[in-house]
Image (spheres, rainbow, N blue to C red):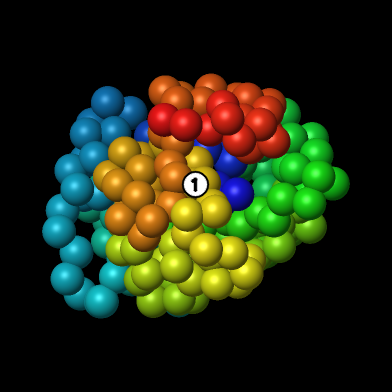
Amino acid sequence: MLVDAAGTLIYPSEPAAEVYLKYASQYGCLLSTTEILANYRRAYSTPWDRTPSRYVADGRDFWRFIVSETTLISDEACFEAIYNHYAAAEAWSVAPGAPAALASLRRAGVSTAVVSNFDTRLRPLLGLLGLEQLFDAIVVSAEVGVEKPNPVIFDAACERLGCRPIEAVHVGDDRRNDVFGARDAGCWAWLWGVDVRSFEEVARRVLQPDAAED
C-alpha cells in the first residue's frame, strides 16, 4: 500500500495563513489572513522553473519564494522561522486512525510506503511523529528527483517494496498527482475523501481485495 503524506497521512495543525501571518507580522507584515491566503494560493500555482522540481534537497529555494510572495516580506529570518515551523512535529496532526490501520496492514503482511512530493524535512518529520516505523519505504520526491504525477516515483516505491505496480494501491488527496499519476504507473488508486474517507476503510479494503475495485 502506498500513501501520500501531506493532506492524507498528515495535516497542518493550524491554517497556513495564520501561521504565515503569526511569524511575518513580527517582521512588518500588515496583510490580513485573507490576503495571505490569496497570495499563497497564487504563489503556489505559479509555474516553477528555477530548479528541475520544486522540492530539490531541503526545498529552501522554492519555499523562500513562497514565503516572500505570500507575506511580501523578504527577510531571511522571517523565512527561516516559517520554514522551521513546518519541520516540527507540533506543526502537524496525524490522520485519525492512521497508525492503528497501518500497523494492522503490516501485521497482515502488507508492505507500506509513503510516496510524497516533499522536501528532505519529511523523513525526520515522520520520525518525530512516530510514523516512520510504520513504513517499509519512504519515497520522497526531493530524494528521487521526480515529483508526482510522474509515474517514475510510483515505480520507485513499488521497486523498494518488491511488488509490481498492479499489486499496489496508492491513496492520496490530489486527483492529478495521486490518482492519475499512480494509474499511469499501473497502480490502483483511491482518492482520499472520495473513494476512501478513513484509514480504517483503507485497511479494510486492502485486506479484502474484492472491495478494492474502483
Residue at 35% x, 50% y is: 183
Residue at 31% x, 63% y is: 150
Residue 206 is drawn in which quadrant?
top right
Q: Is residue 192 above or below residue 180?
A: above
From the top left corner, tell me how far across and down residue 59 is, in percent.
41, 68
Asked if residue 43 shows in the view, the reply is yes
73 vs 46, nearest the viewer: 46
Q: Could you say whether the residue bearing mark 1 is in a helix, strand or loop?
A: strand
Residue 30 is drawn in which quadrant?
top left
Label 1 CA crowd tier, 10 Å (few <14, some 14–19, many 20+): many
From the top left corner, tell me how far across and down residue 79 is, in percent.
41, 59
- 102 relative to 43 in the view: left or right: right
Provide the residue designation for mark 1.
Answer: 170
Q: Is residue 114 above or below residue 211?
A: below
Amino acid, disc 1: His
Residue at 49% x, 71% y is: 156
The outermost residue toward the front is 210
Q: Quadrant of the C terminus?
A: top left
Asked if residue 85 shows in the view, the reply is no
176 vs 26, nearest the viewer: 176
- 83 relative to 99 in the view: left or right: left
161 vs 51, nearest the viewer: 161
